[in-house]
Amino acid sequence: IAGSPATIAYSDNWGVTWVTITAGSVNGQTPLALHTLRPTSIWLATTGGYLYHSNNSGQDWRAAHSGLYTTGDLNAVAFHDDNEGWVVGDGDKILFTRNAGSSWDLFSTGSGDDLASVSLLGDLVLVGTSSGKLFVGGEAGTFSRVTTLPAAIVAAHFVSHCPQVMVAVTATTAYISVNGGWSWRAIAT
């Protein structure tokens, strides 16, 4: 993903050749995160509070969120299925949809931080912040802090379909918890 307008490059031959597609950006947003539910269903989060969706492998795009609840950057996106998904962004904004982006619920962690990552496991949502906080929540909109790491969390995930095992990554260190976030240890990288 690159540039303005939002452009996606893909390869279907292991990177020998690449094709670029414009994601339908009408306001010059810069792409920040991409989530592929499957090769035909792609979600693209951008600056300016925009989220785009393609259901035909990127050939056509529609705005699934266009600055309604935030004009801040949308930094991460994850979907369970064709309908239910989460988007996180600047200013402690969490967006949740049950209908493929036709309508959204607005939540927050209460931290006031910019949100940098989102990961899903069943009904659980794992959210990492720019100040190193990690939260777990769900569709009820209640988020509880699990831990605070010494730097911004750039990625966080549940491991092996187990809510007790989590990995969080900062710019310099990866951390793992095997007890639901009660304790963490750095992983040598």
Image (cartoon, rainbow, N blue to C red):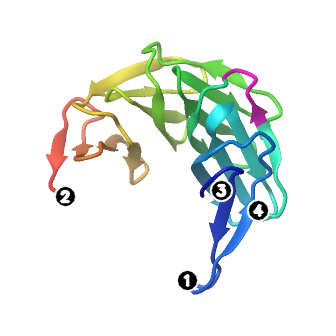
Amino acid type for the residue under numbered disc 1? Trp
Amino acid type for the residue under numbered disc 2? Thr
Give whichever of 187, 113 is nearer the camera: 113
Alpha-carbon span between mark 1 and mark 4? 18 Å
Which of label 4 and label 3 is nearer to you?
Answer: 4
Quarter of the image with the C terminus in it: bottom left
Q: Is residue 52 above or below residue 2?
A: above
Q: Which residue is mark 2?
A: 189
Alpha-carbon span between mark 4 and mark 3? 12 Å
Numbered disc 2: secondary structure:
loop
Q: Residues within 10 Å of mark 4 (few under 14, many from 20)?
A: many
Q: Which residue is mark 4?
A: 58
Q: Residues within 10 Å of mark 1 (few under 14, many from 20)?
A: few
Please provide percent x and percent y for residue 104. Answer: 74, 26
The answer to which of marks 1 and 4 sits earlier in the sequence is 1
Magenta stretch: give its range. Answer: 65-70
Q: Residue at x 65, y 56 (%)?
A: 37
Query: Main structural element of the magenta stretch: helix, strand or loop?
Result: loop
